[in-house]
Image (cartoon, rainbow, N blue to C red):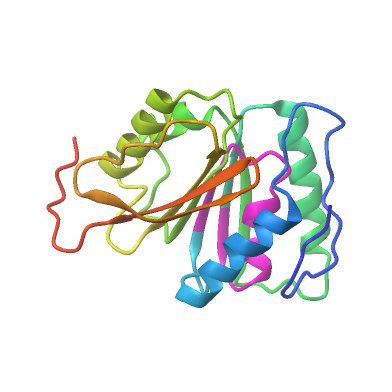
Amino acid sequence: MRVISGRFKGVALATPKTGTRPTTDRTKEAIFSRLDAWGVLDEARVLDLFAGTGALGIEALSRGARELVAVEASKPAAALVVKTVAQLKRNRSWSSDLSARVIVRKAEAYAASGAGAAGAFDVIFIDPPYAFETEACDRLLADLAANGFAGEGTVVMLERSARSERPTPPDGWEITDDRDYGETAVYYIERIEGATGDES
């Protein structure tokens, strides 16, 4: 697996032998074509939940984001993301205004804590295992909104099995677009313009 486009194009991503389900290049390209078209990646703060190989967050950094927080519960997988980030920092295209850090924690616990949000992220990637239940997805979305990780202008990208139930965004949020790519369903979730800030 490699970075598809941008300043780090071609950089290899360290990939665990088992335990993760990396987003296919076809789906990743479709996701980033959409985000690029919306102009949301330039100078963005990006949160990558269930980071796995870090492919989505690192692709965002490559395409113009300035800050990445990658959250991954598996210590071996997180260690590989740390390794990839270290490689990026040695790349001649890395600049001092870029930031990337890896947090070893369950995505659900991170979102529920509200710790470290430091203001809403511009883009949030959620790519849980296909077995992650819809109810848990809905709770995660609600926690991200309630605890300040997601706010006005945030684009949340949720990737699930195309056979899973459609997620239900929290009050004041809506699915603004969704696409199926083979076995994968991708949802884009945004704040409804003019919605109040009380999503609890």
Q: Position of residue 162 (x, y in %)?
A: 55, 38
In the picture, measured across the screen, residue 135 lies left or right of residue 179, that is left
Q: Is residue 134 left or right of residue 151?
A: right
Q: Position of residue 181 (x, y in %)?
A: 62, 51
Count of numbered marks = 0
- The residue positioned 56% from the left and 29% from the top of the image is 105
Does residue 43 sit above or below 192 in this rendering?
below
Q: Is residue 54 left or right of residue 184?
A: right
Judge whether residue 3 is colored magenta: no
The quadrant holding residue 163 is top right
| Relative height, residue 37 to residue 105 (above, below) | below
Q: Considering depth in this image, is 18 or 159 the residue closer to the camera?
A: 159
Q: Nearer the viewer, residue 45 or 142?
A: 142
Q: Is residue 95 above or below residue 172?
A: below
Taking the magenta stretch, the answer to whether it contains residue 63 is: yes
80 relative to 184 in the view: left or right: right
Residue 9 % position (x, y): 80, 70
Identify which residue, 76 or 178, lies in the foreground. 178
Q: Which residues are magenta?
A: 46-68
- Identify which residue is drawn at 42% across, 27% down: 134
Location of residue 127 by image quarter: top right
Q: Does residue 130 sit above or below 101 in this rendering?
A: above
Visible residue check, residue 65 = no
Asked which quadrant contains residue 7, the reply is bottom right
Q: Does the image show residue 92?
A: yes
Q: Residue drawn at (58%, 56%), measured in percent from left and top? A: 68
**Which residue is at a point 39% across and 47% down the rendered structure image?**
117
The C terminus is located in which quarter? top left
